[in-house]
Amino acid sequence: MNKEFILKHTTSFKDNLLEDLKDPEFARHYLEAALEDCENDGDTESLLTAMRDVAEARGGIGKLAKQTGINRSHLYDVFAGKHNPRLDNLLGILSGLGFRIRLECQVSRPASVG
């Protein structure tokens, strides 16, 4: 097999990922996994990359900028890790992607006595 044949009959990982991310449930699981990684190691890069991937799958950074009112170049800088997003921007970006953050209790409450 030659290179041209292989390229003609295969798709890229990124193309497949972006197609899968059009499904809201797939995108939710993808973002949850990235957020969990961020919580575990403190590195925001995987979360920002996941958010950028979902934005690309849902029409691009320009569309997200219009939906959120956040400057397009600022979004590119945030997703590139040049700026840490403020909480209001992070929530706005997630909302623009169709998601929200929910809190979950990590510690179980002691059983009541009596």
Image (cartoon, helix red, strand yellow):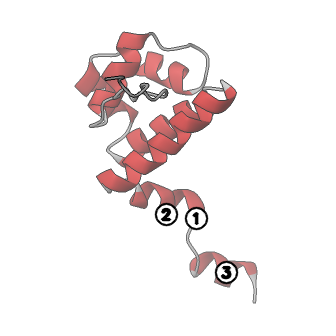
Q: Residue at x 66, y 84 (%)?
A: 5
Near-viewer residue (82 or 73): 82
Quadrant (top left, top right, bottom left, bottom right) of the C terminus: top left
Residue type of the residue flagged with mark 3? Ile
Does label 3 or label 2 sit earlier along the sequence? 3
Coordinates of residue 70 in the picture (x, y in percent): 34, 16
Q: Residue at x 46, y 16 (%)?
A: 74
Residue under label 3: 6
Residue 12 is labelled as 1
For label 1, the SS is loop
For label 2, the SS is helix
Say if 54 sits above or below 107 in the image. below
Quadrant (top left, top right, bottom left, bottom right) of the N terminus: bottom right
Residue under label 2: 16
Does label 1 or label 3 sit earlier along the sequence? 3
Coordinates of residue 101 in the picture (x, y in percent): 35, 28
Coordinates of residue 31 in the picture (x, y in percent): 46, 41
Residue type of the residue flagged with mark 2? Asn
Q: Are marks 2 and 1 in contact (CB under 8 Å)?
A: yes
Task: Using residue 75 as the reference point, say whether residue 113 is left or right of it.
Answer: left
Residue occupying the far bottom of the picture? 1
Residue occupying the far right of the picture? 2
For label 3, the SS is helix
Q: Can I make out residue 106 in this image?
A: yes
Q: Quadrant of residue 20?
A: bottom left
Q: Residue at x 34, y 20 (%)?
A: 91
Q: Can I make out residue 49 in this image?
A: no
Q: Quadrant of residue 18?
A: bottom left
Q: CA distance from mark 2 to mark 1?
A: 6 Å
Say if 87 sits above or below 17 in the image. above
Residue type of the residue flagged with mark 1? Ser
Task: Using residue 69 as the reference point, say whether residue 101 is left or right of it.
Answer: right
